[in-house]
Image (tube, rainbow, N blue to C red):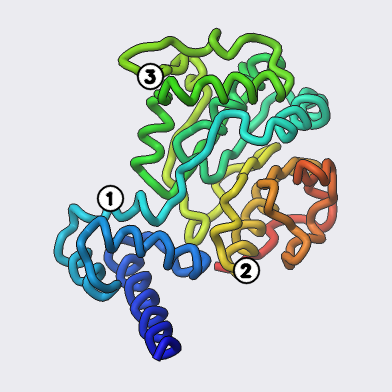
Amino acid sequence: MNDVYAAHEDLELELLLEAIWRHHHYDFRGYSRSSLHRRLARAQQRFGCDSLSHLQHRLLREAELFPELMSFLTIQVSEMFRDPGYFRALREQVIPHLKTYPSLKIWIAGCANGEEFYSLAILFREEGLEDRTIFYCTDISPAALQKAEAGVYELDRVRQFSENHLLAGGKTSLADYYTAAYGGAVFDKSLRRRAVFAEHNLASDHVFAEVQLVSSRNVLIYFDRDLQDRALGLFGDTLVRGGFLGLGSKESLRFSRYSELFDDFEEREKIYRRNLIGTGAIGHAA
């Protein structure tokens, strides 16, 4: 009976994902099924639905539900300078290479609510690279992008942000970059003057620029193997030869069919370098 129930749940999930793709043009079909089941179970409770079929029924008839459902389908939990060793490695090992370029383009793929963007913007300002850098901040969620562009975070999170910044080799006080207002920390809007915020879906969209650094951390862990490969193909396509790719602490290139495109640069912090193999587009999955 449990196997039959699980099979029904899996079928309902596939139909729901197909309905989201056809009706709203957001593609979650390559996301990890176990993760989706957990997130959608919480969505069912929130919307008072006794099954995924019931949730699909409401979603197709009540358009106003979808923006809120997106908050369950996408993970927006992060913090500034998360995993400080990663940002210290960028500062000490990657930045010296980036300083050799007259201009820089950085892609933060899956920027969520913007914590990683502000971390990089502050790091680049401290290292004297801000004025020659454009930051492309992309995410699948319009609501997350709005929060990222606003740059307002709860004050009770700032202490951790500040500790991380110090551990990441920060050269100034994080307090130099925000003001306290309305119960939150409002980050200096000048940090956003070199940033472009835009929707981008790693499951269905394509490369839009040539960049020197892609930072996409704790995004691939929510994808199945095929979608991980697609995303890594995009990253390989967009990086200049010798450009850098930063992944999350639990992510790896090891089993990807695109692993040969990258060399280990700082293996402990999951920073890789695009090698010089081949020319032109990689030809990742459509």
Disc number for residue 225: 2
Q: Find the residue positioned furthest to the left.
A: 61
- Identify the amino acid type marked 2: Arg
Q: In front: mark 3 or mark 1?
A: 3
Direction from residue 171 to residue 71 in the image, left or right = left
Residue bearing mark 1:
67
- Disc 3: CA contacts within 10 A as few (<14), some (14-19) or many (>=20): some
Decide which of tag 2 and tag 1 comes sooner along the chain: 1
* Circle 1 SS class: helix
Q: How far apart are the alpha carbons under marks 3 and 1?
A: 24 Å
- Disc 1: CA contacts within 10 A as few (<14), some (14-19) or many (>=20): few
Q: In front: mark 2 or mark 3?
A: 3
Decide which of tag 2 and tag 3 comes sooner along the chain: 3
Q: Residue at x 52, y 38 (%)?
A: 78
Residue bearing mark 3:
184
Of 269 and 277, nearer the camera is 269
Decide which of tag 3 and tag 1 comes sooner along the chain: 1
Q: Position of residue 135 (x, y in %)?
A: 56, 31
Q: Residue at x 38, y 82 (%)?
A: 11
Q: Find the residue positioned furthest to the front.
A: 1
Direction from residue 196 to residue 42 in the image, left or right = left
Q: Position of residue 37 (x, y in %)?
A: 42, 67
Asked if residue 226 can be seen in this view, the reply is yes
Q: How far apart are the alpha carbons under marks 2 and 3?
A: 39 Å
- Identify the amino acid type marked 1: Pro
Task: Please determine whether, in this image, residue 239 is positioned above or below residue 5.
Answer: above
- Say which quadrant the N terminus sits in: bottom left
Asked if residue 132 can be seen in this view, the reply is no
Q: Residue at x 43, y 52 (%)?
A: 74
